[in-house]
Amino acid sequence: MRDSSQEQMNRPGILTRGVAGMLRALVTEHDPMTILSWVSGVGAIAVLLGSTVRSTPPYVFGDALVSAEVYVLPWIYMKPMTLFTFLFFMSYAFGLSSTSNRERFVRMPTRLRDTVNVLAWLFAMGSGFEIIYHVVLWSAALAVQGLQNPDIIVNPWPNNPYPINVVFSGKLVVLIFALSCFTISHLGRIEREKELEVLRNTQV
C-alpha cells in the first residue's frame, strides 16, 4: 500500500521530467523539418482543443470548428477547421520529410514500402470519393434551404447521435486526400533517389 501511494505521488514528477526531456530533445534537434513538424502539430492540437471546449448545445459534430473565424495574420481571417487542416498537413509533411524519417523509408524493405504505397492509394481512392460525395451533398442541401449560410449545412445520415457539419467533414476528407497524395509522392521521390544512387554506383 505504501509503495503504491508513493508511486502515485511520484507520477506528476515523472510526467514533468518526461515532458521536459522531450522539450530538450526538440530544442537540441538540428533538423529544421523535425522542429517545424512538432511546432505545427502542437498548433493543430491547440486549435482543435481550443475550439472544441467552446462547444455549446445543441451539439453538431464539428460545428464549433467552422462557425467562427480567428485571426491568423493581420487582415487575414480563417476558420479553426481550415487552420487545423493546414497545420496538421504541415506537421505530417515536415515530419515525413525529416532526415530521420527519410532514412527509415530508405532502409525499409521494398515489400513493406510497396504495402505503404498501396495503402496510401487506398486512402486516396476512398477520400477522393468522399470529396465528390460532399460536393453533391453540399450543393443539394444549399438548393433545398435556399441562399443561407453554407456553413450550417449538416448531414443527419446515418442515424448518428449528433448531426455532422458538412464543411467540417468536407475539410477532413480533403486533408486525408492530401496526406495520401503527399505520401505517394514522398515514396516516389525515395524510389527515384535509390535508383539514381544505384546508377551512380554502377557507373563508378
Image (cartoon, rainbow, N blue to C red):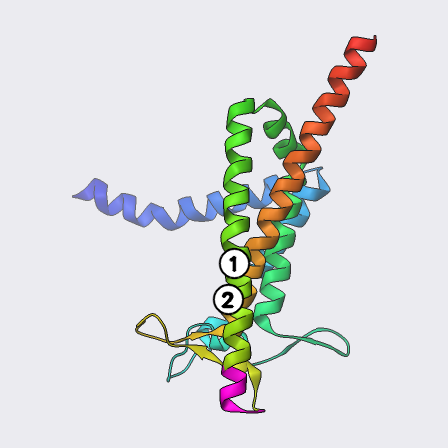
Q: Is residue 77 left or right of residue 201?
A: left
Residue stretch in magenta: 141-147
- Identify the residue under disc 2: 133
Q: What's the residue at 70%, 38% (across, down)?
A: 31
Q: Residue furthest left?
A: 1
Q: Is residue 204 left or right of residue 148?
A: right
Q: What's the residue at 30%, 72% (across, down)?
A: 159
The picture quadrant where one finds residue 193 is top right
Question: What amino acid does circle 2 point to?
Answer: Tyr
Number of labels in the image equals 2
- Identify the residue under disc 1: 129
User: Could you say whether the residue bearing mark 1 is in a helix, strand or loop?
Assistant: helix
Task: Give me the disc on residue 39.
Answer: none
Q: What's the residue at 51%, 48% (across, down)?
A: 123
> Does residue 182 sit above or below 195 in this rendering?
below
Q: Position of residue 97 (x, y in %)?
A: 67, 40
Q: Position of residue 4 (x, y in %)?
A: 22, 43
Labels 1 and 2 touching (C-beta < 8 A) = yes
